[in-house]
Image (spheres, rainbow, N blue to C red):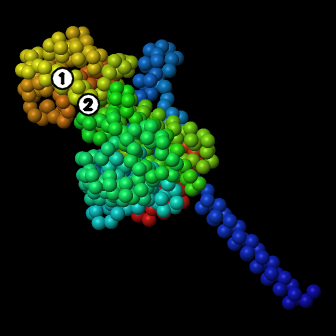
Amino acid sequence: MKASTIVRKTRITLIGALICMFCASFAFAATQSNSSPKYVFYFIGDGMANVQIHAAETYLAQIAEDDTVAGGPKAKLLAMSHFPVQGMSTTFANNRMITGSAAAGTALACGKKTNINVIAMNPETTTPYNTLAEKAKEKGMKVGIITSVTINHATPAVFYSHTATRKNYLDIAKQLANSDFDYFAGGFWAKKADSDVESTAKANGFKLTLDLPTLKAQKPGTRVIAFDAAQDAGGHTGALYYEMDRAAVNGMSLADFTEQGIRLLDNDKGFFMMVEGGKIDWACHANDARAAIDDTVAFDDAIKKAVAFCNQHPDETLIVITGDHECGGMTIGFSGTGYDTFFEILKNQTMSYERFDKTLLADYKASHDPAPADIDADMKKIIAQAFGLNYDELNDYEKQLLEEAYDKTMKDVSVNTPQEDALLYGSYNPLTVTLTHVLNRKAGIAFTSYSHTGVPVEVLAKGKDSELFQGFYDNTDIALKLAKAMSVDLGN
């Protein structure tokens, strides 16, 4: 064989090999780009760290069985605690160690730090950040945003709006109405957005629903803004009721909104869904342990809807759960009970602090003017009704705390300095918050703050690419890991 022939054949062989390598590389890249999860669930428990989760699990176990039974269950795990991937993240803001929901939410949605109160923008509020939800929409996925608080509150807002402060409620609501997202669900507008917002939303193709039957009647693919007519009109106007109060008004649950969101959003290109359990935070701000526990369980019920869907689509679904920060400095353990816990007594609380304020306490005030000098038989009755506490069986210290709080509530008379009152009661009704404190401590629970704390929070994951979320990292990394899994570039 001539040398020139050998050279030509060698060249042809090399070219063929290169072509095969190029085709293989192209096929691998195509496989990679098509391997991202089709369905992405992002659950954010506002104010939720490990202690809120484990308090709920301890409560569920102790109402089922005395925790002193040797070998008996000491915690009944929630669905989220069964997730195979368990990580932790730090939560600090750009300009403060202890974060707020806007800054923390921006980190979780955009993968970048910002200052307190800023919504999905840089600290100088000159440049908007890209969000995971926006990038999912650009990719062709449908997008849903769900919350148990008002729909233009900080955490949901960071996924669809960009503004200098979370207090720009009307601006945020207008950005929602002009959004190209597919499903919004939760509480009514914070600070009562004007009527133009709803008319704009309708003009842009959104169907507004106010109850579960109407929501269930919507066909898949319909763009929906879903509210609940049984909104909580007291305290925090527009939010869903606390879970422990919801049955009294036959209100919708976070799980209802999540289940309907899955039905409406499912399509050939998949979806991205953010679900916030927002009232865990509000309950912990008020140091109402039972309300926080019930809303944590309600959040877990919403997670169960995603888990059921994931079980049907195990190779296409990713579920990530985290908290934006801890709230209240909640602890399992109180010096007054030593090493003992009695979470089962929390079952005797029949309503949240907020519902107590707006119903039983309000009625008492209206019918007792002027107020009796001390806690009377009528007040003892409503204390027992709402919190399961027998006033006459309390110790002298507990009675003293309640009498002082009663005087502050009913007569605005205090034996304390203003600074002491602030530490004792925060911004809450003195009698109500003291009642929750007395009950919490008897159960073996304590709070250190009426505000957020700086402890790390959990990151839990299940499904496709969930292994990315192992380890200890910053909250911005959660968004970056999600972006990697979703094959999108936040570009921030």
Dot 1: element: helix
Which residue occupies the foreground of this view, 18 or 370?
370
Q: Quarter holding the C terminus?
A: bottom left
The amino acid pointed to by label 1 is: Asp
Relative to 157, is 371 on the left or the right? left
Relative depth, front residue between 448 and 293: 293
Residue sitting nearer the eye, 334 or 35: 35
From the image, tell me which residue sits under label 1.
363
Q: Position of residue 43 (x, y in %)?
A: 45, 44
Residue type at tag 2: Glu
Occupied quadrant, residue 424: top left
Within 10 Å of disc 2 (Cα), the crowding (few <14, some 14-19, many 20+) is many
- Which residue is most to the top? 392
Q: Residues within 10 Å of mark 1 (few under 14, many from 20)?
A: few
Q: Residue at x 10, y 34 (%)?
A: 418
* Camera sees residue 46: no
Q: Position of residue 207 (x, y in %)?
A: 41, 50
Residue 343: give its label. none
Q: Which residue does the image show at 32% across and 52% down from the upper left?
A: 198
Badges 1 and 2: C-beta atoms under 8 Å apart? no
Residue at (43%, 31%) from the top-left corner?
A: 297
Helix, strand or loop under label 2? helix
User: Which numbered tag is attached to residue 354?
Assistant: 2
Looking at the picture, does residue 340 appear above or below residue 203? above
Q: Decide if residue 192 is in sight here.
A: yes
Q: Is residue 318 left or right of residue 415?
A: right
From the image, state whether disc 1 or disc 2 is nearer to you.
Answer: 1
Number of numbered callouts drawn: 2
Q: Quadrant of residue 165?
A: bottom left
